[in-house]
Image (cartoon, rainbow, N blue to C red):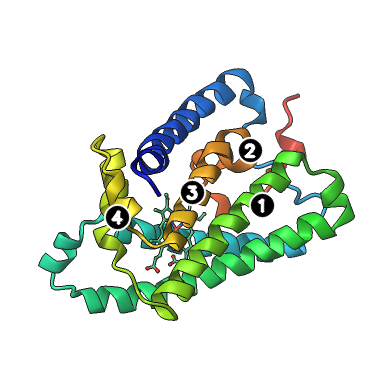
Amino acid sequence: MNDTMNLLLWGGIPYAVLAIFFVGHWWRFRTMKYSWTARSSQLLERKVLRAGIILFHVGLLMVIGGHVGGLLVPKELTEMGGVSEDMYHNVAVVMGTVAGLTLTAGLLILAVRRVGNARVRAASKVSDFVTIGALIAVVATGMVNTIGVQILGEAHDYRETVSPWIRGIFMLQPDPALMASAPAAFKIHALAAMLLFAIWPFTRLVHAWSVPITFPVRPNIVFRRRDSVAR
Ligand code: HEM
């Protein structure tokens, strides 16, 4: 890949995606505040939804934890804390596999339900199918990284390439050459993730920012009690 292509993919597209992400959310909130919802289909089917949602979100939280630890925390810092590269790698692949499989199971249940349940399918928008497709692309390529490359293939120390690259993007000091030297599987995963971030503001994924801290203890759809209706 030539330098111009690398500059575009790993220096230009990330900022274009960040701009779409932030301006898109602002636009969505300003113009369609009342569509800011997970558009739960709990009323149409609840049993499969519950299993899928729990596995998906538990897996996702674990995957996010792994990404923060592996991408945002500099290698030098964990080494200062006594974590060797071997130790990091072993924990990352074991935890990553558990987290990734949990997320994959949840995502597959939700995807099959959305396509297979006639009522849920009929109530879905095109953006719901696009979102699921993008999530499958990101999660599948993530699993290829962890299982295909890190466990079964020739393990790559992405804390020397992908991690400083993404920190450079956030710190406004992009270094596309770092990402250019990563294996293809890692590049494809990062591109899929950027696609997901670019469509995020235009999908039901916006519900993620509505501080869903009470989600585990409240129904997916909140019903008003009969006796609380103003008289
Ligand atoms: C640009 C953003 C992202 C980058 C640079 C990135 C990078 C990585 C890397 C380096 C791995 C391998 C980790 C290891 O084996 O130790 C990985 C795995 C994975 N990623 Fe990402 N990722 C990004 C965004 C995402 C997003 C948004 C999701 C989910 C919606 C995701 C889902 C996964 C999954 C499921 C795995 C396999 C399980 C795991 O190791 O956690 N990634 N990713």
Which quadrant, please, contains the C terminus?
Answer: top right
**Left or right: residue 39 compared with residue 5:** right
Horizontal and vertical percent position of residue 73: 24, 56
Q: Earlier in the sequence, mark 1 or mark 2?
A: 1
Distance from the alpha carbon under mark 1 to that under mark 3: 14 Å
Q: Residues within 10 Å of mark 1 (few under 14, many from 20)?
A: few
Q: Earlier in the sequence, mark 4 or mark 3?
A: 4
98 vs 129, nearest the viewer: 129
Residue beneath disc 3: 191
- Asked whether residue 219 is in view, the answer is no
Horizontal and vertical percent position of residue 140: 57, 63
Looking at the image, which residue is at 44% across and 31% down? 16
**Left or right: residue 90 compared with residue 99:** left
155 vs 8, nearest the viewer: 8
Task: Name the outermost residue toward the top.
Answer: 31
Q: Which mark is residue 163?
A: 4
199 vs 123, nearest the viewer: 199
Task: Give the mark toward the camera: 2 or 3.
Answer: 3
Q: Amino acid at mark 1?
A: Gly
Q: Is mark 1 within 8 Å of ligand 1?
A: no
Residue beneath disc 2: 203
Q: Residues within 10 Å of mark 2 (few under 14, many from 20)?
A: many
Residue beneath disc 1: 133
Q: Do the numbered discs 1 and 4 sit on residues whose CB atoms are within 8 Å?
A: no
